[in-house]
Amino acid sequence: MNDTGNGNSDAPEWVSLAANQSRLSFGLAVTELAERDDRVVAVGSDTLDLIGLRTLQERHPGRMIDVGIAEQNAMGIASGLATTGMHPYLCGYAPFITARSMEQLRNDVAYANQRVVIGGACSGISLGVSGGTHHAIEDIALMRCLPNMTAIVVADAHQGWHATLATQDHDGPVYIRLGGRAVETPVTPIDATFKIGKADVMRDGRDVTVIACGCLVAEALTAAETLSEKGVDVRVINMHTIKPLDREAVLAAAAETGGIVTAEEHHLTGGLGGAVAELLAEEHPTRMRFVGMPDEYAIVGPTDKIRDRYGMSARHIVAACESLVG
Amino acid sequence: MPDKSNREAVLDQLREEALKIRRNSWRALHAAGIGHVGGALSAADLLAALYFHFLRLRPEEPGWADRDRFVLSKGHGNAALAAVLAQAGFFDDSRLDEFYAYESLLGMHPDIKCEGVEMSTGGLGHGLSIGIGMALGARLQKKNFRTIVMIGDGELQEGSNWEAAMAAVHLSLSSLTAIIDYNKVQQSGHIHEMMGLEPLADKWRAFGWAVREIDGHEMGEIADVLDALPLEADKPSLVIAHTVKGKGASFAEDTYLWHNNVVTDEVYEKALAELEWQA
């Protein structure tokens, strides 16, 4: 596993403030961008603390516009701001800011091709005990089918910071999928570089490849350790950008290893696994296994237990890899 | 209106532009063969006053950063918007003959790729939120441009409008004006039979808007209310323009049948003849 540098006392301030939660590192990075560029403005949907934007509100009150619990309105406002040359960062809960305001997102942001960066907090089943109304297990699929859209899934708080900063010079709409109200296992270095559309090979290997995103990158790395002890050499790719997909990384993995397992905290329909399979079906048919949420809604419970129940834990990734190399 | 001695002459010019908008709307819809006649014709007088009296624009420089913004939230009225944009010089008049044509920039609904169009609209209930964003963009960049959003009455049934109505007041956006083209008819029937809006002015006043009701076909009233904007300091302004769906074509007035209908050669000739009598 990479040295994530978390124990380093010389770490920048954002590392401790983010407390290993990407929803907070997103807000901290937006605040940083606002200090660098007067055009940066945050639009919230009753999400000041959820996204960690109190500091922005204190420093630049006019540039933290929280419109309350009104995602459709927030999305339209962000689009309108972007038409005037502002750089809006729109904050919301992943299940609501994608699905509730989907028509505004599609028409006003994606179709009109406006530079709006959307941060979706509490994605996947991170709000396990909140129940199915609060799980976002279709947001990647929704974002992936929109032309002009860039869809990013960050693996930890460090990546949340760097991915958000990477949008500074990006044109067009972006969705950044963020974690929930719990600590995310750090898997990327504090000083990592982030390039939109360029996947990170976290661990090289020749027998099988796991292409993971979000919180399942940590599960994939754990699975790779377990498999290593069994003599199976696993490549782990953090596919942080789902769209545009890093074709070269996928095709190289298909050519160089014995099969591909995708892993995501998202429905098996339309997510990372679908994106990888669509590419490979045309370019390099490959034996695959898919780790993700089956075609049902999750029960209520702690996130780790739900994740395990529906087959999205390290042990399921291990089993999927073994079925390909066995 | 700055020079009162010229007032009638100015109003006559605006009436002439409104008549041209109606002619050009019919022309575009005839070229298309079918389209949203009623809501284009009801908005013609309002659009004439906006584009030839109120909005500060540079048709030769559509992206001018300080221009006033106009969003046609009721995007299905695009024939009238296309007509007024052509008349104002944003693009060549001949483009109106390519309404709905293959690769045309003029489809049934406005597209941001077309010169002079500020936002792609047509999904209803979107425009007011977009206008709020534009007005906030002016405030944050210390620019003086004004934002006008024209909303259809039927689309007020979309709840998103009321989210925006709340926010515009909370944010004290006095540079924002919404104009409701209250023609009382939607696709399937009269508004009051489908899902009534009344008491409409009271609803907006209760939300905190500065409200004025006008006859949306009386050019003097339209010019007066635009000259009076913002209606109150620190509040967004709402103009309820009472209009007639299909205005100017006797067969199309006040009926849902002409919300969206086929425009044959015969219909087109009849419509132009009626407009000729009104000239």
Image (tube, coloured by chain):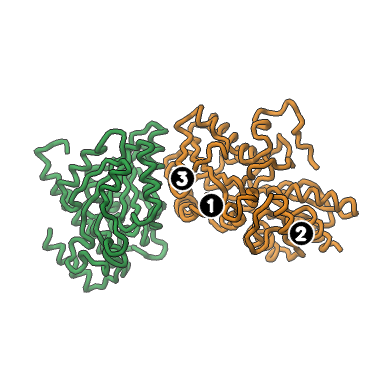
Nearest-to-viewer mark from 1 and 2: 1
- The percent coordinates of residue A269 (x first, y second) are 64, 62
Q: Chain of mark 1?
A: A
Residue at image mark 1: A98
- The percent coordinates of residue B218 (x first, y second) are 15, 51
Q: Residue at x 83, y 51 (%)?
A: A205
| Quadrant in which the C terminus of chain B appears | bottom left
Q: Is residue B150 visible?
A: yes
Residue at image mark 2: A260
- Tell me which numbered mark, 1 or 3, is placed earlier along the sequence: 3
- The percent coordinates of residue A124 (x first, y second) are 64, 52
Q: Is residue A249 visible?
A: no
Q: CA distance from mark 3 to mark 2?
A: 39 Å
**Chain drawn green, letter?**
B
- In this view of the protein, which residue sits in the foreground, B253 or B145? B253
Q: Which mark is residue A74?
A: 3
Q: Chain of mark 3?
A: A
